Image: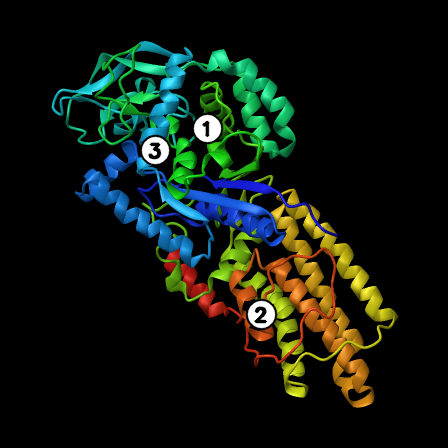
Amino acid sequence: MELNKKNILITSALPYVNNVPHLGNIIGCVLSADVWSRFCKYLDNNVLFICGTDEYGTATETKARLENMTEQEICDKYHKIHKNVYDWFNIDFDYFGRTTNNQQKIISQDIFKKLVDNNFLIEKTIKQFFCPKLNTFLADRYISGTCPFCKSDGANGDQCDSCGKLLDSTQLINPFCKINPEYEIELRNTDHLFLSLAKLQDKLSQWLESNKNGWEKNAIAITKSWLDKGLEERCITRDLKWGTPVPNTEKYGDKYKDKVFYVWFDAPIGYISITADMTETWKDWWYGNNCEYVQFMAKDNVPFHSIIFPATLMGTNEDYKLVDRIASVEYLNYEDKKFSKSKGTGVFGDIIQETGIESDIWRYYLLCIRPEGSDSHFIWDDFAERNNNELVNNVGNLVNRVFTFTFKKFKSIPELGTLNEIDIIFQNQVNKLTIEYINLMKKIKLKEGLKQAMLISKLGNKYMQDREPWVLFKSNIDECKTVLHILIHFQKHLTSILYPFLPDFGFKIEQFLNTDCKKINSELIFNQISGELTKPEILFEKISKDKINELKEKFN
């Protein structure tokens, strides 16, 4: 079965540059996007997988203050940390860029000017906290206080982390300046520009209705809830220094020259600018309908991608490519808690290499528990059990038995003889499950796709047990060669199916077989490879109870 070749643009939610990604961040966007990108590429599609660090905004300014560094120094430091983490996880971006690239200013200012020209922006005078001591207006992230909804202390001026409600800093009870709680703050009037989402509501609603079939249920529900409430104007400018500057326009002159774009407006444009930073032909991906555009994110990022970013692009009246599918997930928790860098709760990317456990094992477990449809939990005991019973006993054991026996007896791949009924039944079973795997993966059901791949692996284990090549070696050498030929080609087939999930495993199998194993076929094909084998090695090791107890102690 030959699958049609097509162009696929994949973006993963841009991680904030001011922190270190934890396991929930990794499975929520970049790892899920990487698996699907690899799957699409191995089906021989044209794929562009884009991501990068989100570097502007208050969060970066705050981090720079805390670490006594400039904003650029903070961005440089954490961009490198993020890149190192993703490299270790084998996240195979086509380009991992930064929103501080030169194209960001050009493209975001151009989009802004078109929104001005098309009358999708309005001016509003709002009240905002001002600090006389600092002689500046304070962005919402510089304000903290008690949440008016859940009464939790320490809510930020833009969102309460306890209840998840989006806030305006003026709503906080007992607000104070986070830079220095001793500094007095007062409300003053200031002018800002707002995106008039209400003018675009009908267009957004029509677009959603015609496009939502490729979206996850939570993305549809979140987007509809915003539309049902009625869209309001959203401020797109901030009183900050670190950001994309608001340009002069004929309509507003230089009135906003000391302001920058609000990061929620600016950051999604980073997908476009990062692509433009990579290639001069970026418009081939971002204009017209030349590709399928798929976005990966956690559910908290949905409104920015399903409402605000599409509305921004619609407001230009240009032929920008809008998202076709939103692959959004729920949250991953750590044991029975939330991940927290400040409290030292959970596993974070900058220290994960210290565990001594290979990245494939982390990838496998995170994808097994990918929070599709509901929140999930990282559990250390379950982590070890899945490695020991599934990766070691199922996948690794089969590879070791097949390759070790074949290498020992023949040193090379035996020729195929006549298939008997058991062989044909096995081939048909593999083909049936492979088609189911491909269909699941095309729907971005990654967790279910991985389950299907493991079922295919179990078929191989059962076939080897049923055919007993070690017995046939003594009684019928030609039939033994046929069985081993089938098993080795099955292993190549299985490797291609598992490659998107376990790239290090795939690479090692390629070394054993001395052939490329990436191309995914819909059926098990024989007589593809021949020649000498490389002596196999153990692929996966069991994780002991003592090791798990050690890791629990380290990360709890």
Instruction: Report how many numbered discs are placed on residues in the image.
Output: 3
Q: Nearer the viewer, mark 1 or mark 2?
A: 2
Q: Nearer the viewer, mark 2 or mark 3?
A: 3
Give the amino acid at mark 3.
Gln
Give the amino acid at mark 2.
Ile
Give the amino acid at mark 1.
Phe
Location of mark 3 (residue) = 104
Marks 2,3: beta carbons within 8 A: no
Q: Residues within 10 Å of mark 2 (few under 14, many from 20)?
A: many
Q: Which circle's residue, 2 or 3, is located before the other in the chain?
A: 3
Q: Position of residue 326 (x, y in %)?
A: 56, 35
Say which of 50 and 457 sits in front: 50
Depicted 379 relative to depicted 443: above or below: below
Task: Report whether 503 appears left or right of 266.
Answer: right
Location of mark 2 (residue) = 509
To which quarter of the image does residue 528 belong? bottom right
Answer whether residue 147 is visible to the viewer in this image: no
Depicted 303 relative to depicted 277: above or below: above
Q: Which circle's residue, 1 or 2, is located before the other in the chain?
A: 1
Kindly give the residue lying farthest to the front in the view shown: 280
Depicted 312 relative to depicted 230: above or below: below
Kindly give the residue lying farthest to the bottom in the view shown: 474
Label 2: element kind: helix
Q: Position of residue 78 (x, y in %)?
A: 30, 47
